[in-house]
Image (cartoon, rainbow, N blue to C red):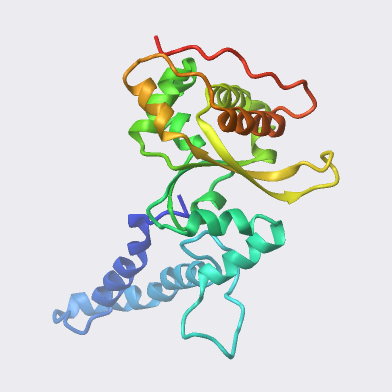
Amino acid sequence: MLWQIDGNYYSLWECLALLLAFGSPLWKKEEEKKKRKWRILLAPFLYLPALLTTLLTSWAGAVGFTPIDPVNKGYYDHLSVEMEKQAERGSLPLFLKMAENPRNHILAVAETPECYRIPAVVESITDVEGSGGSPGLYDDPLYFAWFLKWAKTDYIYIERSFLEEEREARAKEMLIQMANLGILIEPEFANLTKTQESLPEYLLVKVNQSRLEYAWREEPYPVLTKEEEEDAKSVLNWIDYGREVKITCVRGPR
């Protein structure tokens, strides 16, 4: 994947090393000198595509050259650029919250590779339950709670545009069940929109570790506290807006 470090990025150096070897004056034999000529002529045609690819792309998947900035820090400040983008989207407050501790474990229900730019320990829901993960996590709320406990998940970050996709219907249903169980608490919203009845586009919820302990031990969940019930209603209103929100009866782990 272009947004992750990959061994193929070393291919350019290896190609250059081979080209230098082909054009080396160390070839002594007369018959090798003839071969060396066509190797030298071939070298520019092999080198030019690699050079153009290097100039026009980057390991982050960005296309084009880095904008020229005569007054700079001596390096390209990716974090500052990302913060500017987050500010434009209206998600900067949540971005800063997640970035407070680089060891925060975040489960991102959001698009990739954008969610990987959060400066914390981030897993996307696509990786967790996709082809590289376990779709069975959606089979029972207990399984998903086990995963949150095992992965030491601190926060779940959700983008409405991603959650509303048809393919994410199961993820949406699981988040609703997690909210009903009191596992999603302290909701924080960002970027109020006019097109969605003034509901925010982005949501960050803290994972209620104390309730995950009951799932881990397969014990019945206790009744929601008043604060947990208010948090659940707030999260449910955001996830499933437009419907009458009800807190369902809490069923303990089987």
**Looking at the image, which residue is at 47% across and 15% down?**
140
Taking the view exactly as shown, the residue that stands out farthest to the bottom is 70
How many numbered badges does the structure rendering display?
Answer: 0
Instruction: Examine the image and state in which quarter residue 71 appears.
Output: bottom right
Which residue is nearer to you in this view: 166 or 209?
A: 209
Taking the view exactly as shown, the residue that stands out farthest to the top is 254
Question: Horizontal placement of 72 versus 240: left or right?
Answer: left
User: Can residue 203 be seen from the camera position used here?
Assistant: yes
> Is residue 132 depicted above or below 247 in this figure?
below
Question: Horizontal placement of 59 versus 163: left or right?
Answer: left
Q: Horizontal and vertical percent for residue 227?
A: 58, 33
Q: Horizontal and vertical percent for residue 93?
A: 62, 57
**Looking at the image, which residue is at 39% across and 9% down?**
254
**Looking at the image, which residue is at 64% across and 33% down?**
235
Q: Horizontal and vertical percent for residue 132?
A: 41, 33
Question: Horizontal placement of 215 versus 229: left or right?
Answer: left
Q: Horizontal and vertical percent for residue 2?
A: 47, 54
Taking the view exactly as shown, the residue that stands out farthest to the left is 29
Which residue is nearer to you in this view: 242 or 250?
A: 250
Instruction: Examine the image and state in which quarter residue 229 appears.
Output: top right
